[in-house]
Every structure is written in C-alpha cells, then in structure tokens.
Image: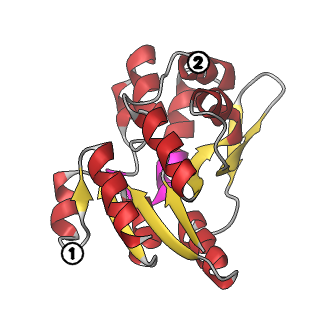
C-alpha cells in the first residue's frame, strides 16, 4: 500500500510565518526552515521575537484566517486523494492549522502543538516526536506501507530521502543544488505525474 506524505507550508499553502511577518511588519520573522535547518533554533528565535513585540497566538491566528491555499493546491490534493492515500506531515501547530485544513477539504494532518498561556502568549511548543517527518515515514513503513514524499525545505529531506520515491516541490535553488539527485518540480501537474508514475 502506498501513502503520499506531503509537507504543508510552501507546498499547499503559503508560509505562515512569512505571511505573519508581512502583516506585522517584522521582517525577521520571514526566516523559515528553508533558511534554518535547526528547527529548535528557529522556533526559539521566533518565540523570542513574538515576546519582544508583545504578540501572541490570537495575533497570529488573525493572519492565518486570511491565508488561502496556493492556486491549484486544493484541486491537486483532491485529485491525489482520489488516487491514493495522502497524509500531510507538517512542523506547523494544531492551533495554526485548522482554518487551512478546512480550505483544503479536511485532509489528514500530523503536526505539533503550541504551549499557550491564558493570555495568549506562546511560551513553548511540543513536537509530536523527534525528527517528526522522518520518524513518521519510518513508522508508516514499519506498518507495511510504501511512502512517497514531497516537500520544499531542509526539514523535509529526511522523509524525502528515506521514501520509496521523494520529490522537491518549489524548493530553493540552494537546496536543489545540494541534492541534485532529488527530482524537483514547480507545478502541481508535474508533481502529480511524478507521484502517479511511482504508485
């Protein structure tokens, strides 16, 4: 049995932190896993900036409510889900994801959780498991499933490189140059065709 494992941000929806950085006028928050491979370091950096500016979860959620999936993402996901099993594996958080999942037709999402005070201050975060994406594809494989993975960032490479087939989608030139053997695509039609070919 095949299961396609997709990243969320940068693949199906815009980067949440970039959208929030632009809305809040804080360019430092545009840093993502495309720029920083160490997720713990990146999140500590983000939470410090939020604290410095007195911003909390409600502020971020207001911006998320205005984000729509990338053009063609819903149709791609619907077509893919009609063809094979699909799981979205993301380093985003439950408190961020719900409005985005509604706009994508409620696909299965495995993600993480924020620790939030009563006043809305984000104080910490809980990862579902270490190396969440790689650990998840390994677990699926241990259940007798073949995984096919696609993502755009450093934190997607574990699941991409350890799956039956893996693809970069709308990634950076630097990541594509670092991993020249990983097929890289820019359109949903290309990615769907590549996935379909290995099912």
Magenta stretch: give its range: 34-43
Residue linked to disc 1: 181
Horizontal side, residue 96 vs residue 15: left or right: right
Per the image, label 1 sits on a secondary structure element best described as loop
From what the image shows, is residue 191 above or below residue 133?
A: above
Q: Position of residue 119 (x, y in %)?
A: 79, 21
Q: Position of residue 117 (x, y in %)?
A: 80, 31
Residue 36 on the magenta segment: yes
Residue linked to disc 2: 65
Q: Residue at x 49, y 55 (%)?
A: 6
Horizontal side, residue 161 vs residue 137: left or right: left
Q: Position of residue 188 (x, y in %)?
A: 33, 44
From what the image shows, is residue 69 above or below residue 155?
A: above
Q: Is residue 152 visible?
A: no
* Mark whose residue sits in front, 2 or 1: 1
In this orientation, which residue lies closer to the viewer: 104 or 34?
A: 104
Q: Classify residue 50 by image quadrant.
A: top right
In this orientation, which residue lies closer to the viewer: 186 or 116?
A: 186
Q: Residue at x 63, y 35 (%)?
A: 97
Q: Is residue 14 visible?
A: yes
Per the image, label 2 sits on a secondary structure element best described as loop
Q: What is the count of numbered marks?
A: 2
Circle 1 residues within 10 Å: few <14, some 14–19, many ≥20:
few
């Amino acid at each position: 049995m095949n299961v396609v494992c997709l990243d969320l941000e940068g693949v199906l929806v815009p980067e949440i932190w970039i959208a929030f950085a632009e809305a809040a006028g804080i360019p430092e928050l545009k840093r993502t896993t495309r720029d920083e491979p160490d997720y713990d370091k990146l999140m500590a950096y983000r939470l410090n900036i939020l604290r410095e500016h007195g911003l909390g979860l409600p502020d971020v959620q207001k911006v998320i409510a205005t984000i729509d999936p990338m053009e063609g993402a819903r149709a791609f996901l619907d077509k893919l889900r009609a063809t094979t099993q699909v799981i979205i594996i993301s380093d985003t958080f439950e408190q961020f994801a719900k409005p985005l999942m509604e706009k994508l037709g409620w696909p299965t999402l495995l993600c993480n959780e924020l620790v939030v005070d009563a006043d809305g201050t984000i104080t910490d975060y809980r990862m579902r498991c270490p190396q969440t994406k790689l650990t998840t594809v390994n677990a699926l494989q241990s259940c007798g499933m073949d995984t096919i993975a696609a993502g755009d960032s450093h934190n997607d490479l574990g699941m991409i490189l350890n799956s039956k087939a893996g693809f970069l989608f709308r990634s950076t030139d630097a990541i594509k140059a670092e991993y020249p053997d990983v097929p890289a695509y820019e359109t949903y039609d290309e990615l769907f065709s590549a996935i379909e070919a290995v099912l």
